Image (cartoon, grey):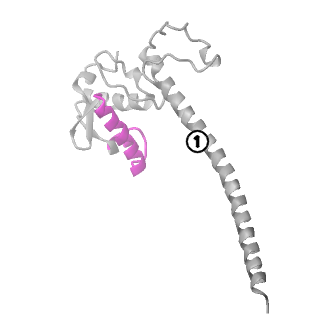
Amino acid sequence: MPSVVGLLEQRELTARRRVDDLREEADRLQAELALAEREWNEWVIARSRVGEVLAPGNDAVAGPAASEGLPAPGVRPARPEPAEAAKPKTVVPVWRAGLAWSALSVDYQRILQALSDRNRLGQGAVTCQEKATCFGLDPVPGKVEALRSKAKRLTARGWLIEPETGRFTLAKDVAGQRGGS
């Protein structure tokens, strides 16, 4: 029969091994935590710096490579003409008098032109399904919804009006431009 002292020593040894294993795991987790915190801090700093650079009215430049082709500090560059600013998938600007259709991407210009042609022929408002057919697209839900999204965006920004739900036409002032100026 084992002695009581022998049993206690055996349990003490088992407990010591467990403590050592847990300490090793804690050290490993501590190192992993420190690494994760460093990475997290780098992302926080990066987001903060991007926010500072993109803040309205901030003329800060990110570095020497970013300053190539830019005017000297304190000199504001000339504002590009709307035609130069129009690029595919750009934000639709809010319509204002004198803003040319060329300020819009090609897809939006096609919508305005189609609605302008319908106005000129006295055909009135059009649904997105009719627009899809007019553009030679299959009137499947995906294509129709893409046109509806664009039409809603143009409506929200004053280029179109929606006299009836789901039917769109040019806003009165936009129609008077006849293709933009």
Q: Is residue 65 left or right of residue 179?
A: right
Q: Is residue 12 left or right of residue 180?
A: right
Q: Nearer the viewer, residue 117 or 19?
A: 19
Q: Is residue 125 left or right of residue 42?
A: left
Q: Outermost residue toward the bottom?
A: 1
Could you tell me which secondary element the residue under label 1 belongs to?
A: helix
Q: Position of residue 113 (x, y in %)?
A: 35, 28
Residue 63 magenta: no
Residue displayed at 22% across by 25% down: 172
Q: Nearer the viewer, residue 21 or 56?
A: 21
Instruction: Please tell me how crowded label 1 is: few (under 14), some (14-19), or many (20+) other residues with Cα within 10 Å.
Output: few
Residue displayed at 31% across by 15% down: 98
The C terminus: image quadrant = top left
- Count of numbered marks: 1
Q: Is residue 59 above or below residue 152?
A: above
Q: Nearer the viewer, residue 50 or 8?
A: 8
Under mark 1, the amino acid is Trp
Q: Position of residue 132 (x, y in %)?
A: 38, 42
Residue 149 visible in the current orientation: yes
Q: Position of residue 1 (x, y in %)?
A: 79, 93
Residue 140 visible in the current orientation: no
Residue 140 magenta: yes
Q: Position of residue 73 (x, y in %)?
A: 53, 8
Q: Is residue 136 above or below residue 55?
A: below
Q: Main secondary structure of the magenta part?
A: helix
* Residue 62 figure quarter: top right
Residue displayed at 37% across by 37% down: 150
Residue segment shown in magenta: 130-159
- Dot 1 corresponds to which residue? 40
